Image (cartoon, rainbow, N blue to C red):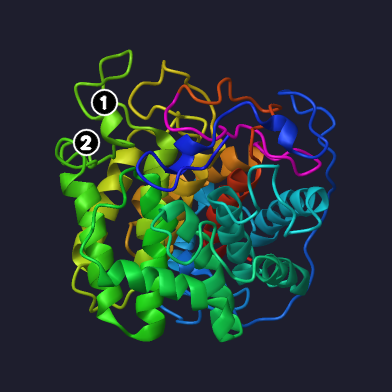
């Protein structure tokens, strides 16, 4: 099993059938999962991980566990009743429970995932994005130490080194940059900045040949641009986003009709799902939606391409709202509910992440989207086992059929990225929720 460095990259490089790589796992049903329960406690303030926004404040965001907002608080009270979210404390309890299960399973953050993969590959990097989201809303010193120990164990380096062009490899830089904002030690961003600087200096803009890459790397460019007050990162980021959106594959991966994304060129029309509709994979669209959320929460209001990002975010939100299941989840195939239809946590969590952020910041209307967020959170909460294990996680892949069947008890081939998605979504729900 190998992780490709470019081209067919992203989740397609993490093949199925590796559940045995996880300590304590014995079968697809998730027996001997181990784990532990846990709760939340007090903490110190000073970090705001809302939508990837570190130390910037921003529309409605507050550092260190604050969760009020410009439009969010008003939206929650104004759309009360059946649409009211549960308490922030109840959301945090599930977040800590799930995270405690994972940390108990992986007490050494530097330990290799298996014989072929270090713990800095994209799956683990996505987990740390979620962990920083949890830390931002309820900062616990142990969680910060766990993240810092992870970066230190890898000497703040990247899988593939500081010359990699793989978005998967660059994903770890999101957390390195977050931790730099908390404690600005130059070593923490030395490699990721050198790597991205090489990309910015080059002419190529077609690196993101699969939509997962947009989430893995796009927020890194946004964060570096904000930290360095440099539009060069923003302009390169836009050029690469535009290439994926408008020119990769037949005519870009983004449907200007459906306002959803094909995962890569292999799924461009005439490829269709069994019902004849376009193949829009839930998590692939979730990656893009999360990336736009994180970028919009990081770049300044004056950034020259912000309006386009915002328009794409709003159009996606409307398209996604229309296909939410009645139980609050989204199907793995967004337009074909009969093709492996059923609950799936990762795409649902990423959609909840963006929509809750949008409501909280006045980008999406509370009347229109708070009910969607409420249903999504109910679904997400239903996936959490008593011991913190997360059900309904589709394993790594690139299309609806991968990692099937997806069930409440099945252990996915990699647990880390599913938890990262859950923590991201839950962190924004918690910010939107009443105390």
Q: In this view, does 74 lie above or below 338?
A: below
Q: In which quarter of the image is residue 33?
A: top right
Point 25% across, 67% down: residue: 202
Pinpoint residue 399: horizontal percent, then vertical percent. 42, 28
Residue 274: image location, x then y, percent: 33, 13
Q: Name which residue lies at 68% across and 27% down.
A: 410
Look at mark 1 in the image and give the residue it sits on. 278
Residue in view at x 70 percent, y 60 percent = 89
The secondary element bearing badge 1 is classed as: loop
Q: Does the magenta stretch include residue 394?
A: yes
Is 27 above or below relative to 416? above
Q: Do the residues labelled 2 and 1 touch (CB within 8 Å)?
A: yes
As drawn, the label of residue 258 is 2
Look at the numbered disc 2 and give the secondary structure of its residue: loop
**For residue 194, side relative to residue 267 (left or right):** right
Residue 406 falls inside the magenta stretch: no
Q: Is residue 17 left or right of residue 266?
A: right
Majority SS type along the magenta span = loop
Distance of label 2 from label 1 (alpha carbons): 9 Å
Viewer can see residue 68: no
Q: What stretch is highlighted in magenta?
A: 383-400
Q: Answer few, some or many: residues within 10 Å of disc 1's Cα (few below 14, many 20 plus, some between 14 and 19).
A: many
Depth check, mark 2 against mark 1: the one in front is 1
Tell which of 399 and 278 is nearer to you: 399
What residue lies at 65% left-to-right and 37% top-to-bottom? Answer: 382
Front-most of 336 and 356?
336
Q: How dense is the environment of label 2, judged by Cα within 10 Å: few (below 14), some, or many (20 and up)?
A: some
User: Residue 39 occupies which quadrant of the picture?
Assistant: bottom right
> What count of labels does the image hold?
2
């Amino acid at each position: 099993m190998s992780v490709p460095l470019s081209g067919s990259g992203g989740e397609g490089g993490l093949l199925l059938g590796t559940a045995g790589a996880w300590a304590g796992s014995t079968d697809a049903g998730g027996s001997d999962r181990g784990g532990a329960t846990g709760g939340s406690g007090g903490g110190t303030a000073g970090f705001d991980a809302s939508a990837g926004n570190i130390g910037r404040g921003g529309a409605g965001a507050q550092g260190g566990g604050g969760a009020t907002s410009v439009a969010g608080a008003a939206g929650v009270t104004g759309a009360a009743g059946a649409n009211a979210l549960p308490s922030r404390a109840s959301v945090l309890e599930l977040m800590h429970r799930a995270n405690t299960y994972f940390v108990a399973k992986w007490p050494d953050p530097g330990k290799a995932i298996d014989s072929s993969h270090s713990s800095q590959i994209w799956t683990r990097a996505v987990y740390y994005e979620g962990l920083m989201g949890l830390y931002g809303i309820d900062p616990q010193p142990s969680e910060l130490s766990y993240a810092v120990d992870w970066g230190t164990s890898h000497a703040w380096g990247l899988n593939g080194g500081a010359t990699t062009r793989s978005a998967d490899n660059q994903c770890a830089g999101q957390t390195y940059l977050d931790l730099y904002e908390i404690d600005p030690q130059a070593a923490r961003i030395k490699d990721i900045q050198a790597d991205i600087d090489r990309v910015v200096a080059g002419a190529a803009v077609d690196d993101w040949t699969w939509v997962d890459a947009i989430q893995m790397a796009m927020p890194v460019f946004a964060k570096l641009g904000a930290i360095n007050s440099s539009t060069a990162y923003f302009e390169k980021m836009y050029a690469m986003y535009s290439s994926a959106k408008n020119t990769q594959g037949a005519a870009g991966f983004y449907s200007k009709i459906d306002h959803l994304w094909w995962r890569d060129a292999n799924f461009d029309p005439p490829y269709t799902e069994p019902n004849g509709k376009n193949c829009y994979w839930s998590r692939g669209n979730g990656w893009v939606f999360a990336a736009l959320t994180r970028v919009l929460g990081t770049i300044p209001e004056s950034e020259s391409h912000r309006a386009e990002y915002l328009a794409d975010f709003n159009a996606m939100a409307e398209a996604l709202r229309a296909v939410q299941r009645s139980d609050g989840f989204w199907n793995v195939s967004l337009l074909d509910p009969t093709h492996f239809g059923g609950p799936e946590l990762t795409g649902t969590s990423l959609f909840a992440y963006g929509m809750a952020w949008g409501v909280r910041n006045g980008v999406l209307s509370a009347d229109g989207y708070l009910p969607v967020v409420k249903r999504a959170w109910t679904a997400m909460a239903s996936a959490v086992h008593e011991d913190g294990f997360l059900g309904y996680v589709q394993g790594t892949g690139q299309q609806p059929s991968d990692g099937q069947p997806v069930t409440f008890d099945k252990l996915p081939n990699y647990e880390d990225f599913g938890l990262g998605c859950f923590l991201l979504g839950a962190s924004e729900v918690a910010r939107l929720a009443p105390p």
